Amino acid sequence: MTAPATQPRVVRRYPGSLLLAEIKESFFMAMGALAAHKLRSALTLLGVLVGVFSIIVVMTAMRVLQRNIENDLSRLGSQTFQIRKWPAVYFGGPEGFEKFWRRKNITLAQGRAVMDKATLALNVGLESNFWSGEVSSRYDKSPPNVGLIGATPGGFPARNWIIGEGRGLNDTDVDSAKDVCILGYRLATLLFPLGSALGERVKIDGINYTVIGVLEEKGAALGGDQDNFAVIPLTTGLNRYGAIWRSLSILVQARDQAAYDDTVEQVRGILRAIRKVQPGAEDDFEVFSNDSLIEQFKNFTFTVRIGVAVISSIALVAAGIGIMNIMLVSVTERTREIGIRRAIGAKKRNIMTQFIMEAIVLCEVGGAIGVALGIAGGNLTAYFFEVPPVIPLDWVMIGLLICSVVGIVFGTYPAFKAANLDPIDSLRYE
Amino acid sequence: MSLIHLEKVTRRYQMGGETIHALREVSFTIARGEYVAIMGPSGSGKSTLMNIIGCLDTATSGTYVLNDVNVSEMDDNQLAEVRNKEIGFVFQTFNLLPRANAFHNVELPLIYAGISAEERRRVTVEALTSVGLADRMTHKPNEMSGGQRQRVAVARALVNHPSILLADEPTGNLDTKTGEEIMGVFEELSRQGNTIILVTHEEDIARHARRIVRIRDGLIASDEARR
């Protein structure tokens, strides 16, 4: 049998191991309690799950969208900005929309003035999208989604278009509005599968154009349509598709990063002068670059983020109250257990730790499921936009941290109640 | 050398404006290695006495010295520590954690004592082996018989090598045969030098002890040594 009580104690104590053992013990007890009441626990978890899910799903989707926009924008060359009548992204009511609508169009004459006067710019190009549809050659025809872009020579470097074969547009093509075109790489290989497209004729919107050049392939095209367009002289397009109601975009490439801001200011000044904007009045055109677009996107998503934060915190508070409720029930049900633990030497602090730990485990299980579902749900947008999936690690951490906080905040009162039960009464509790 | 020394211990309760005297200036001493039965009808104050000896309750007045330490002035945390290290409880209703297996039930006091995992494992296995349950370690209480449950409880009480083994009606929920078996375990523990205090109202059970203290109306009615 056991050693007599008079024998000297051989047990060694490790203060650090108490907390560790306690947490481990509490964790397993909590998992046991969870497993013992599956339905009840599942219903309680649901609140936390929804709260965390809503955070993670939106944050993941936002990140996917941002990446998608960044991918799209990389088409613009470096140190390039664009000027248009319309903003690139607009999130507002109809009254703001009207303001843009009332603006004067950016005309060819204005564009030419900028080209003449912008001394700081390396390249200035004018551009307009005219049409999109089916393009055919004598060999084949394309799907009906080919864009027809009118441009000037300066637009090529600004757009990062590099001539792979033949030549680009020159001033003569533009001045005399020739029926020539330059094809995107994929379009060229589709229409002329057997050999060079140069000198061949393609039919775009019923009119024949002579192919004078083919662009180099653009990197790995995620959307697949970065090469799916044809470029014609801007003037040709304006003649065919009308110039009156059309507002052009101006592409300006600065000489280098250092001159970028000055270039933007110079071009703004030129445009304000020729469009007769009163001193002190707002610009009646939009200037944007890759950076400013990303900035705008971030500003927009900030609003969404705030909304999500509010909604999910309401969900989490409701979930927390559910957790508190179930913990109170659990404390009552386990009064006897608490009495036993106190009798064999648990301090109030130990009982507190155990019940808070249980609340945290309950929250974390819900939170972990919410995180998993949120990442999956958010990445549906990645699937939709055909960009690689994203795991927002920072938000996963924040989400799980919030779960712990909810557990601690709403678990403390039940745990306090448990710790302060009278050991004698709780031992007799039936 | 006395292990337990009570000096004029009084315990009063307030119940609905009425004062109940559960214990009135009780004084007695128990030496190390004694096997004492505390007897008395219900309402006599024997449960209160047991709770005080077991450090679950504190006296309203008087002093209680356990193992040369004055327990009567301790706070809640200190009392918990004394319960953990000095006292092993065995209850009538076994009071095992229903969802934990035998091993875990016995290990629990060691966790609160802050003992390392390897040592806990060694000591727990030792305690369960000593009550003959080495092969039942992974069984939960509801997978064991009453006798086996009570032996798990005894193992749990002994695992921290306490100064006192405090048994409250340990055979109350067992049939006569199993009850005798458990009393045999106590007998053996007593022979090894453990101090045992048995709280009961059954003469047959009390007869196993070598000293019987009878309580009536909060006072010691008789205190006699047997054999």
Image: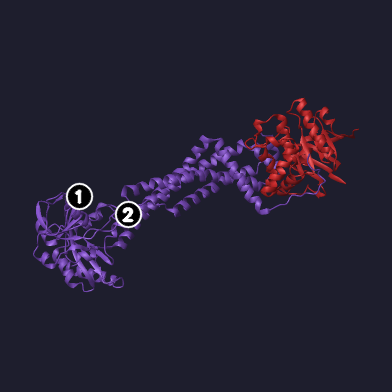
Task: Tell me how the rendering is colored.
Answer: by chain
Residue A55: x and y, percent? Answer: 42, 49
Of residues A76 and A286, which is closer to you in this image?
Answer: A76
Q: Is residue A403 left or right of residue A107?
A: right
**Chain for mark 2?**
A
Q: Find the distance from the CA under tag 1 to the CA under tag 2.
A: 20 Å
- Residue B149's image quarter? top right
Colour displayed for chain A in the image of the structure: purple
* B151 versus A401 height, above or below: above
Check the rendered structure and report the hue given to chain B: red
Q: Which residue is mark 1?
A: A145
Q: Are marks 1 and 2 in contact (CB under 8 Å)?
A: no
| x, y percent for residue B75 | 73, 49
Q: Quadrant of residue A118?
A: bottom left
Residue visible at 51% across and 44% down in the picture: A365
**Residue sticking out furthest to the bottom:** A119
Camera-side residue: A199 or A258? A199
The answer to whether dots 1 and 2 both sit on one chain is yes
Residue that mark 2 sits on = A68
Q: Pick out the residue farthest to the top.
A: B176
Residue lying at the far right of the rendered structure: B227
* Residue A7 horizontal/vertical position (percent): 81, 47
Looking at the image, residue A393 sits to the left or right of residue B207; the answer is: left
Secondary structure beneath label 2: helix
Q: Amino acid at mark 2?
A: Asn
Query: Identity of the amino acid at label 1?
Result: Asn
